[in-house]
Each structure stands twice: as structure tokens, then as C-alpha cells.
Image (cartoon, coloured by chain):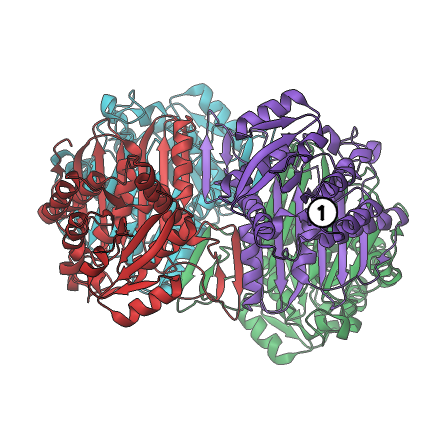
Chain colours: A red, B cyan, C green, D purple
Amino acid sequence: MEKVGVGIVGSAFAASLHADAYRRCPYATLVAASSKAPEELRQFCSRFGIPHAYDDLGEMLARKDIQLVSICAPNFTHKELALAALSAGKHVICEKPLATTVEDATAMVKAAAAGRRLFYAEDWVFAPALVRVAELIAEGAVGKVVYVKAKETHLGSHSPFAQKREYCGGGAMIHLGIHAIGFCLALLEDDLTEVWGAVTGGGEANLVHKDYTGEDWAVGLLTFAGGARALVEGNYVTVGGLDDIVEVYGSDGVIKVDLSQGSPLNVYSRPGFAYAVEKADTTKGWTRPAVDELRNLGYPDEIAHFVDCVRREQPAKRGVRAEDGLRALEVVQAIYRSAEEKRAVRLSPR
Amino acid sequence: MEKVGVGIVGSAFAASLHADAYRRCPYATLVAASSKAPEELRQFCSRFGIPHAYDDLGEMLARKDIQLVSICAPNFTHKELALAALSAGKHVICEKPLATTVEDATAMVKAAAAGRRLFYAEDWVFAPALVRVAELIAEGAVGKVVYVKAKETHLGSHSPFAQKREYCGGGAMIHLGIHAIGFCLALLEDDLTEVWGAVTGGGEANLVHKDYTGEDWAVGLLTFAGGARALVEGNYVTVGGLDDIVEVYGSDGVIKVDLSQGSPLNVYSRPGFAYAVEKADTTKGWTRPAVDELRNLGYPDEIAHFVDCVRREQPAKRGVRAEDGLRALEVVQAIYRSAEEKRAVRLSPR
Amino acid sequence: MEKVGVGIVGSAFAASLHADAYRRCPYATLVAASSKAPEELRQFCSRFGIPHAYDDLGEMLARKDIQLVSICAPNFTHKELALAALSAGKHVICEKPLATTVEDATAMVKAAAAGRRLFYAEDWVFAPALVRVAELIAEGAVGKVVYVKAKETHLGSHSPFAQKREYCGGGAMIHLGIHAIGFCLALLEDDLTEVWGAVTGGGEANLVHKDYTGEDWAVGLLTFAGGARALVEGNYVTVGGLDDIVEVYGSDGVIKVDLSQGSPLNVYSRPGFAYAVEKADTTKGWTRPAVDELRNLGYPDEIAHFVDCVRREQPAKRGVRAEDGLRALEVVQAIYRSAEEKRAVRLSPR
Amino acid sequence: MEKVGVGIVGSAFAASLHADAYRRCPYATLVAASSKAPEELRQFCSRFGIPHAYDDLGEMLARKDIQLVSICAPNFTHKELALAALSAGKHVICEKPLATTVEDATAMVKAAAAGRRLFYAEDWVFAPALVRVAELIAEGAVGKVVYVKAKETHLGSHSPFAQKREYCGGGAMIHLGIHAIGFCLALLEDDLTEVWGAVTGGGEANLVHKDYTGEDWAVGLLTFAGGARALVEGNYVTVGGLDDIVEVYGSDGVIKVDLSQGSPLNVYSRPGFAYAVEKADTTKGWTRPAVDELRNLGYPDEIAHFVDCVRREQPAKRGVRAEDGLRALEVVQAIYRSAEEKRAVRLSPR
């Protein structure tokens, strides 16, 4: 097979991240996209040069020239869409979280076991800066890793689906913090034994976003069998642009990564300009404009990996297998349970 | 009274922080120091030009020309020393933590109520960068504060007294994290309702320092009556020099402070040099040498404030009153209890 | 003499820098100020608690309780004011530049030789970060210093006197770059052999400020007898707040100093706040607010040094003696001459 | 033509930069390499999977499956090699500087005019951060650009050919500063009117490298017809790793770029690790390890552009055409002449 034919489900923000990545990949062809929002779909296809647009998913899945489907639709639709695509014989990439419940995610993993591949789109696993972190650790730069801190935070999602618990499966932890969780699980390669969590409860209990039904602030602490700890955060109470930070503490070193605003550029602008970083509410004054934000966040390398997995029938990297998505969701749910019950929650080994 | 006469109890690291600060204060005179370590005491007095040295505390306390005593001795001795100094009619500054148990600290607060003043030496309250943070918040720069993160971490204490639970009262949280706690309590000026904590247990349960009987890693989460959260950390697993970080998240802004390594200097040195920052294990390669580390950490302004309180019979600032030290210790102990019981701990309003 | 009595000539920006510094100095008393701008003078004295205000300099100089006079008036008045104060028997601190011509400056140095002291107020010599630089060099941290870069730049002076060549003696080099020159001359302690310079010519030849009659951009290169080079800059074409940078390159190390925006604070503010750094045109968005800007720039330590010189009849530090001010001015004039003649200018050894 | 066949002349450092970039390009095939150093050539071909190795350039150029030749050999050989490749009917990419003399470079440009393409490999033109700078300027982020500063500096070249004037054509300016010159000429798109320069003279006149016959420190100032200035630097007296900095000052904004050490990673390592940044002499202590150094410096995008130019017969981008290489060399030579004559040099419009 020379090039992999791709169909995208969705036409909003996440769909654009995938489409950009496919366009950079010489071994993929964007064949079609499907969405319930016809005008958004038209613009999306036009922007990325996608030749075929479908309002009916089944029609898109019936195409023989599509081997791989990216699911970039709201969280609560992931299960149904993934099962449909898998049963149509397509390989599937599903955006984070894998689903809104562990049950749904488990069903997806099982469905994939029958034949076609299911990939979990945790882009952080391919973020070049974080790949470099893994290399440095492997080289012994920091000795034994004992503590990791990771967070994704910003000022609130632009998507109405992210603001409602029923669509999203929760709030800031399932939507943002799950990146930090997925990254830590992939990095530490160890069994989790205990999870603790704290969240604002949504609605009036939120710190800032009283209109979100999911929490707008969340913290989780993961304890691994070998003793290492990971402190993960997701929140919508951080203004000033996307703030994704990873810190690794080892017995002989420290690594600090500013994934979102660690740009080589420092800019002061009176008039402002088109774009600095995701979720920034101004480009005036001092900013650190990203040079290639989507690459920094891992999307092109992630998609290239999935395309390669399909073309060469290779296994997916740790952190982006379907079961990794399931495990990340289990951890999110354990954080929610811990926050609810105000006590630490023990996890059974995987 | 023109100048306040001062006696220092102790001759080790903390004593040097106070001595340096007194020397910068035109309204204080360093009269004497007292210590059980005669050679260390001799060198200490010589270094700071202190004319009188005592191995017997009682003799020092008998001097009429001393009005103010700084207690810079191991944590477990604070109570006894403070009571002795207070009953000798001296005003007392006690280093953090106020004591190793809430009972001891309560006794100290009561003893001070009888007449002489008892100050709690939380230097962060006077760290110029953190004073600036409080000003910015008061000016409305970040809107309503909803979340604060604060930590003090380094690679392990140089003091044998800090490595044993019986001398120190715990480990990294009581010794380092207490700065973060004291600062947050002073800044947020609100009742705490709930505390959660996690710590490594000391000894073999520690991440790195298996020979410390207190924990070498600790995290605490404070929930305030008005909803704000504070995440505080103290650990001994952070190499690369003292790492003191404060972050304030408000509804309309963010403040990030690098208290220990946020120097205007960035230096690369092949041969190295005398001193970069506290607890750094090298001055070779790239470093951010502090310009005036003790001032950055608040000591001179703190001591000047206490001297001024004594001279002008003024009340101490919020955060450095004896009761603030007691409250900080209550929070530390609540963190320890939460970690022990693996559940959140509710605090009664102060 | 217990305290030194001080009179300030001027009531504008530079006068406030001195007044703030005197107020921090326990060995000085601000006695009086003199200015031609009565309303500004009134507000100035009120702001700094200065008891006596004079519109006539002679009356102020007649006071017996003034021993030290700070000249903080426009550059072209320095000579006349300094001569008046010296002949009234006062010690004099003169702001940079010492004068607008080498002839005037030479006359001032000669007048001071007769008895009273004349100090040259180059605050950078006392900037704590730059004092630390000198210490690091002395400790051998960077080996032999071979190259220094230093600049002061901002978006244009708020003073009408700085915008006209006849009042200022030039433009950005004499007004801003002179800090860099004075610092380099003090640091390198070596004879200058050659000076090269380039400036925009003022007026229509300027890059941005066509209404300034002095240059709005200037660069100078100094070659020292031992081979070291110094590249100095001053310009009014740098928006985003005062930008003072010093870099030292040695055979075994590098020191980079961000004197004006190297704050430990990083702030994002939607509403803005009172003050971030000098010459910043906004406090909204991301800024690095100074913690104690005047101290960072050296004013309090500079004034304390001059007061100490007077009280204890000590010699002034290299870099702030009257002859250092004269030499800095000679270098500025050599830069102007080089730019005019478009060739390097040789300097006779001092 | 599906893929472009490539031959590389050289097997040392610059050759590896090109080989890495070709390997990332799906539209190029590395066919062969040629070098006078047989063992180095063998290792080079093995490392990059290049199937054919030649000690005789003529034999390599005789291959029909090579359409494009990269010249990565010492500067003084560029002319002869380029003419040979062009007359063999190959398109040619020549590393910087285009040649060691303006005469040679002119001959190369003329030879290329006859048919085959000659590209000038100024990688900075494709450095993603600098491409972003050009976009920001085009968007009006900084208003009108009036002043640019750019430099490449490090601790001295590892190549013996870079240390001798006869092989290199000069010293730090022709070897390092030429990046800054090429970038400024491409960015400002304006005629140069005047050049000023200063260099250490090589040998004993050098600041640090007395054994280099070319200068180890150089500064140049370029004045453009529209008034803008550019200050360019190249030196070998900067330890601590490659230091490539670009600053753009506009009427309404500022852009500062740290091209070499502006990494999102900040690492402290006691044991050290494999690689941090080019020319760093340690990986211990604090470092800013590059995430993808060669991409940051522009090589992959540059090579992809040249391959695309050949495949699709497109014109090369401003800054990497043969005439741009010639102009950059003319500016270098003007800087050398100015330094020699100690006066500004006027340039005739291009």
C-alpha cells in the first residue's frame, strides 16, 4: 500500500488538528470528512483540500479508498462512532478521552480486538519536547525518576461540548488533565497503586466557570508500585494562553518543560497580530508566539506514527494503544471517585 | 530606645541568616550569641562581629542590654528556649516551625500573651517579590484569587536535625513546605475548611533519602471557606539548587514567581565560583546566581520589621505573629494526619 | 557628624530617584529642594517629606544644615549649578552626564579639586546585579574578560530637555548609552585606545523620533589597551519598557544580565495595574514587573555610598568620581566625532 | 521526476547537516558522497545509509541518477567544486560562504547562469523561528522595522579549515557572522548604502584564539537606503554553547529570538547526557537541550525547498539564490575592508 486513505469524523477544532497533521504526512491522503454541521464541514473541507464531504457517516465509511478514520467528535459520541468505523472494516484513531465511561471504553477495546486497529490519540506522547524528555531519562540524565508533575490548563474551552458533563464525561480533568495522565502512565511504565483526587464540583462549586456543569479545576496524585509519584492537573482557571507544563524530578537531575509557551520568540507588539498561542486572549504586549504549535503539541508526529502503523502493520507506541486510552480513563474516573469520597482510591494492577 | 539589643540562640545556618539581617539593620545591635557548639559559636561570633559568646543560655538572658532574642536552634528546642527567653523578659523571634507539636506551640503563644512579644519568623512574608505579589493582587491585577501554588524544595537539608523526625517534627513539609503554608495563609486571609495531604513516610518509604526518618516528599491541598485552593509542596528530591516557586491564579490574571533562581544574572562558568544559590551542588556550567539571596528570601526586611515592632511597640504583620506560626503548624499536622489516614481532614475555623 | 544634610536641585524624574534613595539612607536627612517649577517642586517636597522648598538656589545653598547637594536638573545646567554649590561649600553629586561638553566637565572637575567633593552619579556602578558581576569576574568565574556588551534603551524620554540637543548635549548616547560607557570604563579598568561610533543624526535622519534634535539611535565600540572590546548602545527605538542589558564574555565564561526586566515575577493581567517597569506603555498582558526597580538600578546603594564618603571622608568608588564622569563624557564625544567623520577615533591615554 | 537523486561533496560536519535533511525529505534520494578523507567518508555513508562512496569527484558527477549536488567542503574549494558540478550538468547547493573571494563567487554565479541552478545554503532563511519572525513583521506586529541585531557566536570551530584564513576566507565574520548578514539582507529587502566593521586581526591580535589566522571576533554595522540599521556579529569568544540571537526593533514592537538555546526544556543533570546544543562543552549542570537542533537551524526545510525547486523548476526563495550568496560575501568583504581602513565603506547599489 503506497498511501493510506483517511476519513475524518468531525469538522471542529480537533478535526483541524488531525487534518493539518495528515496534510504534512506524505503517506496519507485525506479522502473525506463527515459531520453533522454542514456549513462548518464545508469550510473545513475547503480549508484542508478534502475532496469529499458527508453528512451521513455510513456513506463515508462505505468508501473503499478509506482505510483509516480519525474520530474528532464530542467525547460522548466516541464509542458509537468507533464501533461503526471498526465494524465497517476501518482502522480507527480516537481522540482523547477514549470515551466518557470506562464501560464504553472497554467495549471499544474489545471491538478492536476482533481485527481492525484502534489507536488512542494522546498527542503528548509524540510532542518532540516530551520525546526528548524520554530520551534524556533513558540516557540517565536525571538518574532514577521519582516524581513527575504535569498539567494542561487554560482559560476555558471554546467548545460547548466541553462545558457540559454529559457530553464531556466530566470537566477539566477528563478534558485537559488526561493529557498529563496519559503522558505519566506512558513515561513511568509502572503499575499504579493509588490515586487521590480533588476537583471543584461543577456549577456553583466551580472557581470561575459557574456555567460549566463539569469541574473547572482538578488535581490528581498518582502513586506507582515502585514508589514514584505523579501530580497531574487540569483546569480552566488559568488565563494568559494554554499552559502545559511537565517537570521530571530524578535522583540526579531535573527536567522542566514549558510545552506551550516555551517559544524561542519573545515578542512585544502594540498593534497585535494574528495568533500567538492557543487560548491566548490577546496578542498585544509581550507574548511568546509558538513557532509551530501543532508540531510542538505532537500532532504531526502522532498522525505519522499511526499512518505508519497501518501501512507497515506495526504495533503502536506505548501510550497511544487503545488500552492506554482505557487506562487513562480509569485513572480519571478514580480521581473523580477519590474527590467524591474524599479518600484515596486503590487501583487494581492492570 | 535608640537601638534594640539582640541575642541570638544558635550558631548554625539559621543563625547566620538572622545575624546577617541584624547587621543590615541600623536600629539593632548584635550583643551576644549562645550555643552548645563552642567552636561553631566562636566562628559565628567572629564572622558577624558579635562581642559576647555564651555556652550557657541563662547567662546571656541575664544581660540587661538584650531586649530581643532570636531562636535559631533545632525545632524540638524551640518551646523550651522561647519560654526561657520570655520569662527572662525578652521579646522573642522564633524560627519556623514555631514548634514540633501543636501543644508546644500553643504553650508558647500563651506564654507570650503574658507580656513579652513572640514573633514567628516566616521570612517569605517579607520576601520583596512576594510583597510585590500581594501589592499586585491588592491593585486588582489578577482579579479574584482562586488558586495558589507554592513550594520550597531542594536536595536535602545540611542539618542533621532536619533529617530526624524527633528533632524536626516531621520531614520536608514541616521544614520546607511550611514556608508555602505560612505564605498562603497570610495571603488568602480566609478560613481553612479542609486539608488533604500526601507524604512519603520516611526511611525506606522515602523516594531518595532512605536515611531520613521524616518524609522526603510531601504535598498538601488547602481548601478555603471562600472556595480558593492552595497546593503546597515541600520536598528533598529536587536537585539543582533551592527551588522556591509561587504561582497565583486569579479570575483575570496569573502571577508566577521564581523566588530562588529568578535572578537577573545568567552565568556560564567553566572554573566555577564561590556561590550561586542555596543548596546548589555546583557553580560550573550555567547557573542563575542570586544577587542578594538573603534579601530575596525576606530575612533583612523581616528582621527590620521585628526590630521596628519592638522599638515602636507596633503589632506584627499578618503571617509573622505567634498565632500565625501556630496555625501554620496546625496545617502541617493536618497534612500529616490526612496522609496517615488517607482521607481529607476538616479543620475547625480559627 | 551624625547625619548628612541634603539639598536637591530639581524636582522632576531624576530628583525623585535621589529623594527615594536618601529616604532609605539612615545617615542622610533631606533638608530642602530647589526648582524653577514651583508646582512640581511643591508636589515633590510633599511626596518625599522634604521640609523646605526654594525657587532660588542661592537661598538653599546658604543653609548651614546642608552639606551635600544632588544636582538633578537638565544636563546643560549642570556646570553652573555644580560650580555654585561647590563655591557655597557644599559637596556635590551630579547626575549623568557630568556636563554637555568636555570643557564644562573639565571646569567642574577643577572646581572640585579646590576643596569640596564632586561625585558623578553613575547608578549602574551600584546596581546590585552589576556589583555581583564584578564580584564574579574577580572570583575568576569567566576567566579573562575580552568583550563586554552593554546598553540602555527605551521608547523615548519623557523629558522635553532630553529631546533637544542644546539641552541634553546630544541624544540617546549621551542620555542613555552613557550608563553603558561608565559601567564599562569602571569594569575594565584599562586605558581606551580607540573609539568608533555610529548615530542617527537627529531630526529627519532619526529612525523614529523625527522631532528629537539629538540622535534616537547610537552605537559605540571601545577598544582597550589590553585588547578587550566593549560595544555600547543607547537608543529610543525600543518599545516594551526600559531595556538595560549587560553581557560579559570571558575566556572561560559568560555573564548575561537583564537589569531592567530580569524580574523574578512573570505576570499576566487583563485589567492591568499601577506600574510594571520604567517606560513600559502597558501593564496589560504579560509583563515582568520590577520588584524594587530603583534598587535594581543602583540608586539607594549609590546615594548611601556618597553619604558615607561625605560622613567618613572616604574616597569615592571607581566609576563615580568626578574624573570618571569626565572620561565618560569624553568617550561620548569621541563616539559623536567618529560618527560625524565616519572613521575610528584614537583616544589619548588618560 | 518522482525523487531527486543527490550527491554530497564532503563527509564532515556540514555534510552531516545536509545528509540528515535529505533523509527527512521524501522527495530526495541520497545516492552518493565524495570526499578526500576515506575513513571519514566510509563512516559518513554508513551513518546516513548512503550507498555509493567516491574518492574521485568526477566519478560521482558522472552518475546519471544524481541531479543535485550539495557542496559541503572547505570554503576555499567551493568555486572549483561548484564549477565542476555545474559543468557536469548538476544542480548545485553550496554551503556558506559561497566562496572566499567576491571574484570566485561572481564566477560561480555566472557559471550557473548558463543553465543549471546554483543555490546558496543560508539555513537561517528557513529556520522556523526566523520564518515566524518574517510572518510577524508582515502582519504588522512590530510596525516598521528600523533596527535588527543578529549574531552567531560560539567557542571556536572544530574544523581546522575554519581556523586558517587561506582556507576559510577570513575568520568569525565569514564563517559565523555571514548567517546574520544573509538573514538581514533577506529580511530587510533593501539596498545597503554603507558598511562599517571591526575585527580582531587574527593571530596575536585575537582575543582568545591566538592560533587562528583569521579573526576570532567581528562586528559589522549595515546601513540601508531606507534608514534601517543592522548590527551583525560573529565571534569565537563565546563559551557555553552555540549562541545565535536575532532581535528586531520596529516602530511598534520588538521581537527577540534565541535560535540556539531557546529550548522549551530546562535540564539539570549531575551525570550529564549525550548532547545538549552545538559547541556546548558540557552537558552537566543546567542546560537548555535542543529538541530538534537541525530543524531549529533551518536545514530540513532548506533542503526540502531546494529539492522542491529542482523537482518543480521553481525559483529559489530570496536569501538562498546564488546572487544572495554573492551579496552576503560582498558585505563580509566590505566589513573586512572597513576594519582594515578604519573608516566606513560605501556600497554601490546592487
Quarter of the view holding residue C286: bottom left
The answer, for residue B95, to whether it is visible in the render is no
Chain under callout 1: D
Quarter of the view holding residue D212: top right
Q: Residue furthest bottom?
A: C39
C50 or C63: which is nearer to us?
A: C50
Instruction: Give the image location of residue B10, x and y in percent.
Output: 39, 29
Instruction: Give the image location of residue A92, x and y in percent.
Output: 24, 47
Q: Is residue C316 left or right of residue D127?
A: right
- Position of A58 relative to C156 (above/below): above
Q: Is residue C118 left or right of residue C293?
A: right
Question: Amino acid type of disc 1?
Answer: Ile
B168 or A105: which is nearer to us?
A: A105
The residue under label 1 is D178
Q: Is residue A85 left or right of residue C83?
A: left
The answer, for residue A228, to whether it is visible in the render is yes
Q: Residue furthest front?
A: D64
Q: Which residue is located at x 78 percent, y 38 percent?
A: D80
